[in-house]
Image (cartoon, helix red, strand yellow):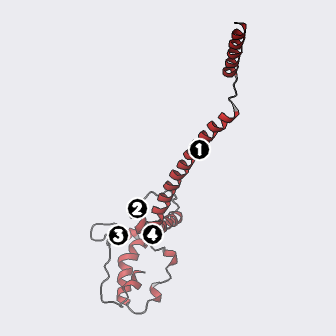
Amino acid sequence: ATAIATAAATAASASTAATADPMPPRQGSMVADRAGGVAMLDLIASAVSVVGSVLLITYGLRAMDPGRGAREAATKKKQEIAKRLGRPNITTNTYEDMIAVDVANPDTISTTFDTIGGLGHMKQSLHELVILPLLRPELFTGGNLLKPVKGVMLYGPPGTGKTLLAK
């Protein structure tokens, strides 16, 4: 009976020691670490895959956008115009940005009326209709008859100087 009691006490102390030991057996922990490590690697691989896919789609769509170059040119031109006007915070929409590309900077135009040969009557008319109201607005303030014109239409066959006069 004492032998049985001694064996039972030894078994009980061994089971108590096993449950009280904070460190699990070495071989069992390797298996648990490998399973957890594999799960962690799978999670990291999935996250990298998702991030890579999002970046690929984002930059791929930007690269394939046919209007990207025009939009960038329009934004650059808008910034130049805003800088020249002294108004850096101009708010425009996409349509206005696209029109800004076609706006000519008057400082870069080297054509003057003196460099245009011929077309004397047309040059005189443009001077009276467009330039004089800008230079002398006080002459055009009285009544509807003396108001400056709202626009000028140049027409004629190709090669007659319409674009040169417009410059």
> Disc 3 marks which residue?
140
Q: Position of residue 64 (x, y in %)?
A: 45, 66
Tell me which amino acid carries mark 4: Ala
Q: Are marks 1 and 2 in contact (CB under 8 Å)?
A: no
Separation of residues labelled 3 and 2 (CA atoms): 36 Å
Q: Position of residue 46 (x, y in %)?
A: 53, 48
Look at discs 4 and 1 and give the one toward the viewer. Answer: 1
Look at discs 1 and 2 and give the one toward the viewer. Answer: 1
Separation of residues labelled 3 and 4 (CA atoms): 40 Å
Depicted 86 relative to depicted 139: above or below: above
> Disc 1 marks which residue?
38
> Disc 2 marks which residue?
94
Please tell me which residue lies in front, 26 or 49.
Answer: 26
Separation of residues labelled 2 and 4 (CA atoms): 11 Å
Give neighbour class at mark 2: few <14, some 14-19, many 20+ (Cα, 10 Å).
Answer: few
Most distant residue in the top direction: 1
Tell me which amino acid carries mark 2: Thr
Look at discs 2 and 4 and give the one toward the viewer. Answer: 4
- The mark nearer the N terminus, 3 or 2, is 2
Q: Position of residue 165 (x, y in %)?
A: 40, 84
Separation of residues labelled 4 and 1 (CA atoms): 49 Å
Separation of residues labelled 3 and 1 (CA atoms): 85 Å
- The mark nearer the N terminus, 3 or 4, is 4
- The mark nearer the N terminus, 1 or 2, is 1
Q: Which mark is residue 70?
A: 4
Tell me which amino acid carries mark 3: Phe
- The mark nearer the N terminus, 3 or 1, is 1
Q: Are marks 4 and 1 in contact (CB under 8 Å)?
A: no
- The local secondary structure at tag 1 comes to helix
